[in-house]
Amino acid sequence: MRSLFRSSTIAALVVALALATRPVAAHVEYTAENPERTEPLAFLTDVVSEPFNAALLLGGAVTVLLAVVAYLRILPLRRDVAVFREAVTEYEDLLPWLLRLSFGLPLVGAGFAGYFVSPAVTPSGTGLLAISRLFQIAIGFALLFGLATRAAAFVGLVSYLAVAVIEPRILLAMEYVPGFLAIVLLGSGRPSADRVLETVASAEGTVYGQIDPIHRLSGWFRVRVAPYHEYVPTVIRVGLGVNFVYLGLVEKLLAPGTALSVVDKYDLTAVVPVDPGLWVVGAGVTEIALGVALVLGAFTRADSLVALLMFTLTLFALPDDPVLAHISLFGLASALIVTGPGPYSLDDKLVGWFSSAPSGADSGTPSPGGE
C-alpha cells in the first residue's frame, strides 16, 4: 500500500510538472469569438436595472418557488415516482461500471486530443505533451477495462489535485474529484478485469492465486472502505452541485463579455427573444440555483434530470463545445438518478415540512428526490 501511495505521488508530480500550461479558452470561452472585456458588477447592475429583465428574473424565481410548494403540498404522481425509484435502483450494482465509463472515455479522448482533463489545460512542449497523453490514456484504459481500478482512480485524483495547484483552469472540470473519489470507494464492480482476476486468484488450486498477492491487498482495502459506500451519492451530489455553482459564477456572471460573445455567435436571442444580458444572467443564475439544490439534496433526482437536459441542449446549441468534456457530467447526473440523494440531504425532510402525510415506505409517499 505504501508503494502505491509513493508511486501515485510521483506520477502526480510528473504530470503537474509536465503541465506548464499556456492560457487557452474554456467551456463557453473556447466557443467565443473576440470577447469584449466587461466589468461584472456593472454588467449585472445594467441587466437587472431594466424593469423588463428584473420582472422576468423575479417572476421566474417566484414561479419556481410556487411550483415547488404546490408540489410538496399535493405530491402528485406518488405511485409513478415510487415505481420509477424502484426501477432505477435496480441498476445500483452497475454504478461502478457507469462511473468507470464516464471518466475512462473522456480521459482517453483527452489524451489523444492533446489536452489534460479539461480543454482549458493544454501542456506546452512536445515532450511534456507526450507524457500527458500517455498518462491519461493509461489511466483511462485502466478505468475502462476495470484493471487496478482503485489505484488508477487514486492516481488520477492525486494528479488532478496537484495540477490544480499550478493551473486553476482545470477547476472547470472539477467533476473529476467526486468521480475519482467515488470510484476509489466503490471499486471496479462488474464487468471488470479486476473481478475476473480476483475470481481466478481466490479459486482453490490455481497457479495465478499463488503468484498474485494483489487480490489479498485489494480484499483488505475493500473491507476497510465498505462502510463508506453509503456516502458515494453524497460525494457525487455535492461535487456535481459545486461544479454547477462554480461554472455559473465563473463562466457567466464573472465573465459576461465571453458569455455575451457566445450568445451573439450562435444567435441565441433568436431562440429565446430576450436581451443578451438577460441570457447570460439567466443562465448563470439557473446553474447556481441548480447547484445549490444539489448540494442541499433537494429534489435530487429531478435536479439530475434537469442537469441531463441542460447538458443535452448545450451540445446542440454550442456545436463547438467538445462532447468529450461533458461525458463525465452526464455520468455523474445519471449516477444520481440511480442512487438518489444519499445521506445528509433535504429530500427526506421536505415532505414532512410541507405535508401532514409522513414520508417513507409505510405511507407510500416517496420523498421529493425519490429517496
Image: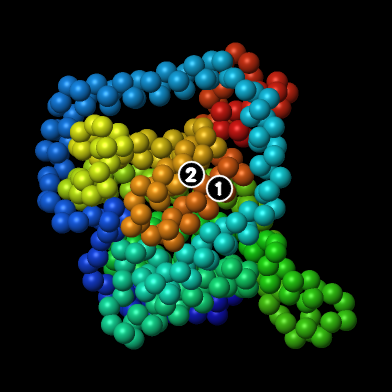
Q: Residues within 10 Å of mark 1 (few under 14, many from 20)?
A: many
Q: How many marks?
A: 2
Name the amino acid, label 2: Leu
Q: Is residue 155 left or right of residue 360?
A: left
Name the amino acid, label 1: Ser
Say which quadrant the C terminus sits in. Answer: top right
Compared to 206, does 276 lie above or below?
above
* Label 1 close to label 2 by CB (< 8 Å): yes
Instruction: Tell me residue 333's x, y (percent).
Output: 51, 47
Q: Is residue 225 left or right of residue 206?
A: left
> Looking at the image, which residue is at 23% across and 55% down?
32
Compared to 219, does 258 lie above or below?
above
Q: Which mark is residue 308?
A: 2
Instruction: Tell me residue 235's x, y (percent).
Output: 51, 49
Which one is closest to the eye, mark 1 or mark 2?
Answer: 2
Instruction: Tell me residue 112's x, y (percent).
Output: 43, 75
Compared to 238, does 16 lie above or below?
below
> Looking at the image, which residue is at 28% across and 26% down?
57
Q: Mark 1 — residue? A: 334
Between the residue at mark 1 and the residue at mark 2, the CA separation in whole angstroms equals 8 Å
> Looking at the image, which residue is at 29% across and 53% down?
28
> Looking at the image, which residue is at 40% across and 24% down?
64
Label 2 sits on a secondary structure element that is helix
